[in-house]
Image: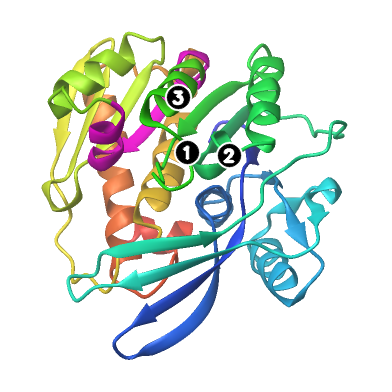
Amino acid sequence: MARALNVLTVGEALTDIICTRDGRWEHPGGSPANVALGLARLGVPTSFLTALGRDARGEAIAARLAGAGVEILPESWSLASTSTASAQITDDGAAHYEFDLAWELPAEVELPVADHVHVGSVAAFLAPGADRVEELVRELREVATVSFDPNIRPALVGPASQARERFERLAALADVVKLSDEDAQYLYPRLEVGEGAGAILALGPRVVALTLGARGSLLVSGSGSVEVEPVPTTVVDTVGAGDSYMSALLHALLAADRPRLEPSGSDELAAAGAYAARAAAITVSRAGAEPPALLEELSR
């Protein structure tokens, strides 16, 4: 990067309880926490506003993030106990979740100076904290660029029509929106994937990225659309793949240092998408949400 761009990530952190036919284990997770971890491992100065409990799980999450260089804001220690997500991993590597999750933020938070703000997942939809997330985005977008990943969890976001309304309000405030094809299908069931991406772009973001699993990804901006092929790899599980894609995409777009993160053309957009795809491929090749470090990612 030409200069150190500070990123503030806002959203849930939780403990993933991973269950497979071979056993059960716990691992720190949560989509926004994974994005913060991925950014820090890629060398981006990152702070994190979340909701943790002062228990063993909360301390493990904090230690993992701090070990990568993430600054956890002190207001994050606000819960009686740390949230959990139980993920049942099927034989094809897909994850199916059940949640025990609380999400709220203090009314007053001392925020660090940030050039970019990332929000997403359950924190963008679950009361009472979701309204505060939206308030923070509205406050900060005047001085920072914004990214948003809805990472839809149908059991937690309420009725689809209500979730779509909130999604569209946040997408309209964001410069970059990343979502999966499953997210797009949930939000816009009557539209094809490409049509959904176009509808989201029309809300106002500069870049919309749709991850398509084994089919790669689709990125659209004002300069057009590009399809990015998946990177061949052996899939262990898909936990955190989209989050690694998100953090690497942001790293690439921030490094380009364009106004409101808008790529200069389709070549730059394709390069950012390919970089994100490499990061996701590394993550799915190992168990749990383990995004790559900078030197590791660039060596591929």
Q: Is residue 238 visible?
A: no
Secondary element type, mark 3: helix
**Residue, x 24% and y 70% (percent of image)?**
93
Looking at the picture, tell me which residue is in the foreground, 255 or 57: 57
Q: Which mark is residue 244?
A: none
Residue 254 location, x and y as percent?
A: 49, 31
Mark 3 / mark 1, whichever is N-terminal: 1
Mark 2 / mark 1, whichever is N-terminal: 2
> Which stretch is magenta?
170-187
Q: Is residue 181 magenta?
A: yes
Residue 234 location, x and y as percent?
A: 18, 72
Per the image, the residue denoted by label 1 is 157
Per the image, the residue denoted by label 3 is 162
Label 3 Cα neighbours within 10 Å, binned few <14 / some 14-19 / many ≥20:
few
Q: Which amino acid does the dot numbered 3 rest on?
A: Gln
Q: Is residue 196 left or right of residue 83?
A: left
Q: Which mark is residue 126?
A: 2
**Residue, x 30% and y 72% (percent of image)?**
89
